[in-house]
Image: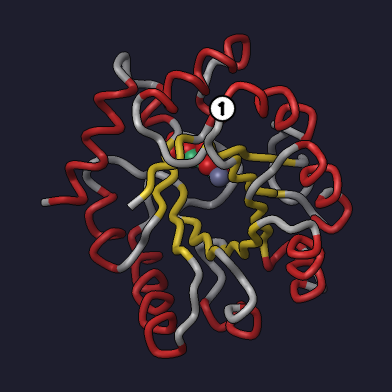
Amino acid sequence: MKIAPSILSADFANLERDVRLVEEAGADYIHIDAMDGNFVENLTLGPNVVKAIRPYTKLPLDCHLMVQSPEKFIPAFAKAGADIITIHVEATNHIHGAIQMIKNENIAAGVVINPGTSVDAIKPVLQDVDMVLVMTVNPGFGGQSFIASTVEKIRELAELRTQKGYHYEIEVDGGITHDTIVACRQAGADVFVAGSYIYDDENPEAAINRLKDACRN
Ligand code: DX5
Ligand code: ZN
């Protein structure tokens, strides 16, 4: 299993410190939430932030694009140093083409589904992706409560992967705690994004360890 701290909950005035902190604490990816004020009701981080933190960590930069028409932004994120780009199926009319665009940049490509979107919506591209991100909250803000009805979709994706021999990682994002992580892990998730659970803790390393321990039990 992998832990991907979301820097949405980090201190933006001390991003270098907060990125190094979670790397030293055993994080596996750095999760970067890009929001455009259109696809979701919030404005956050763009390619300039990816470029700024790139020199300060060796960890893969996992860029989650909550933007309408992600095709417009893929080249800039790739150039800035993204290692993984995930895009929402709800945000483009051309999900297949947009996935190919990411792959043509020679970086890992992922597709994301909102809590109200079924696995059926992404079946045609599952053979092409390196990651499937199942949103476990409605995107837009950190610190929201986990939506339990999403767990069934994790299970479905894990079963499809085995049946069809697909190779994607299953990532979950939103409301992940030492408690909610257990059902996600049991259903087959591999990568766990956590923002407020890690960065709001006075000891982020202990929070990361609690997440890892919860998956072992
Ligand atoms: C939500 C973002 C998440 C967010 C998670 O729209 O995609 O990555 O930072 O925050 P927590 O872990 O606090 O729910
Ligand atoms: Zn995210």
Instruction: From the viewer's perspective, tell me whether residue 89 is left or right of residue 142.
Output: right
The quarter of the picture showing ligand 2: top right
72 displayed left or right of 179: right
Residue located at (74% from left, 51% from top): 39
Q: Compared to 148, does 10 lie above or below? A: above
139 or 95, nearer to the observer = 95
158 relative to 116, above or below: below
Q: Is residue 211 left or right of residue 53?
A: left
Where residue 35 sits: x, y (%)? 71, 41
Residue in the picture at 43% in, 19% down:
21
What secondary structure is marked by label 1?
Answer: loop
> Disc 1 marks which residue?
57
Direction left: furthest residue? 217
The furthest residue to the top: 13
| Residue at x 56%, y 27% (from the top left corner) | 57
Question: What residue type is disc 1 on?
Answer: Thr
- Given the current orientation, which residue lies at the most extreme bottom position? 163
Residue extending farthest to the right is 72
